[in-house]
Amino acid sequence: MSRVNDIQQKMKSEGVEALLITSPYNLRYASNFTGSTGLSVITQSKAFFVTDFRYTEQAADQAVEFEIVKNTGPIYEEVKAIVEKENIKSLGFEKEFVTFAMYEQISSLLTCELIPVSGLVESLREIKEDSEVETIQKAIKITEFAFEEILNFIKPGVSEIEVANKLDFLMREKGASGVSFDTIVASGKRSAMPHGVASDKKIENGDMITLDFGCYYKGYVSDMTRTFSLGDPGEELKKIHQIVLDANLKVTEHAKAGVTGKALDDIARDYIKEKGYGEAFGHSTGHGIGLEVHEGPGINFRNEKVLVSGNVITNEPGIYIPGLGGVRIEDDLLITENGNKNLMSVTKELIQL
């Protein structure tokens, strides 16, 4: 079945007469369009893609299931024309993505009712097709290559920002179009900061080092974290590393279709709590990845929905002790009927450089 068809079926089941798609991620998912200007109106039987003269040829090539509409004036004038031509009475819009200013602009122009819609396309994106998994796997291979290379680059006196820049360069060299997010390099006491984006701090002997990074490859992301040390980080951090690794392995052991995001989060959290570090694990155990680095399903205490085959999730427990340091270990897992496939293969054991 086509993605447009899937969206239309979902619209019918949710009672959405027509849908305006403006989120670039949802637009890409629905149409395969990779340009930077465009929007879509999908009705229960038709699909329109609106863009300007710069992208009409590209849209015709990529958005094959859509009728391509060229806007010569303001883009929402074309939306108005579609609404009137198709006699649309109510138009759903992506409430998480449409700003108030944009809402005011659309509502002043259109005569139909505007209905806020949440998660309609995103819920379809949560279940990956084989081709999407293959692309994510390629993004992961690039990330793993960069990790193995960077281990030869890290030595006393190298700054975190130098490590981050080198990682980003290594991934681009292998075909990445960009990074999934600002690369995190947190060493020594800074490794106690879960999102310690690379700083000018120089890496020293005895430092624990957390690298959390990923890349975009053909529109899809990877997201990986490994924690290792330069020299001996001391007994407590070595113990913490083992606890986090065991928590990560326990999540992998239980991750499969039919298990809720909350249940997986509980597995990591309960184990870390049992080892005496419950207060030091403040974030969720994971999240979905795909066209965005954070998408559904959430692996957190709020998600009571069961995972399904085709979900791709992160598994990233962590322990952070201010003044000492921290550890996070993260894999990307493909959920299957009977278990999961870990899409990552580089070691998680404590490497001491």
Image: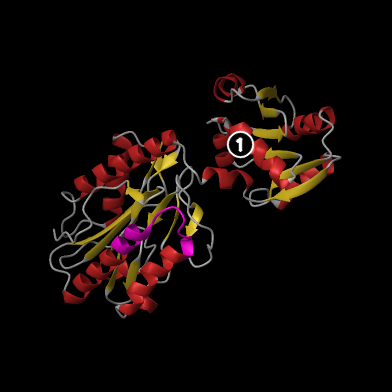
Please identify the dominant SS of the magenta region.
helix
Residue for point 44% across, 37% down: 132
The percent position of residue 250, horizontal first and vertical second, equals 31, 63
In the image, is residue 261 part of the stretch drawn in magenta? yes
* The N terminus sits in image quarter: top right
Mark 1 closeness class: few <14, some 14–19, many ≥20 residues within 10 Å: some
Q: Image check: 93 left or right of 133?
A: right
Image quadrant in which you'd find residue 194: bottom left
Image quadrant in which you'd find residue 191: bottom left
Viewer-side residue, 335 vs 242? 335
The percent position of residue 223, horizontal first and vertical second, equals 37, 50
Residue for point 78% across, 29% down: 82
Q: Height in image: 181 above or below 284?
A: above
Please say which color scheme the image uses.
secondary structure
Viewer-side residue, 40 vs 11? 11
Image quadrant in which you'd find residue 75: top right
The percent position of residue 258, horizontal first and vertical second, equals 47, 56
Q: Secondary structure at mark 1?
A: helix
Q: Residue furthest right?
A: 111
Q: Which residues are magenta?
A: 248-262
In the image, is residue 229 part of the stretch drawn in magenta? no
Residue for point 16% across, 68% down: 206
The percent position of residue 99, horizontal first and vertical second, equals 68, 50
The three-letter code of the residue at mark 1 reads: Asp
Q: Height in image: 71 above or below 110?
A: above
Residue for point 20% across, 66% down: 207
Q: Is residue 284 visible?
A: no
* The C terminus sits in image quarter: bottom left
Report which residue position mark 1 lands on: 6
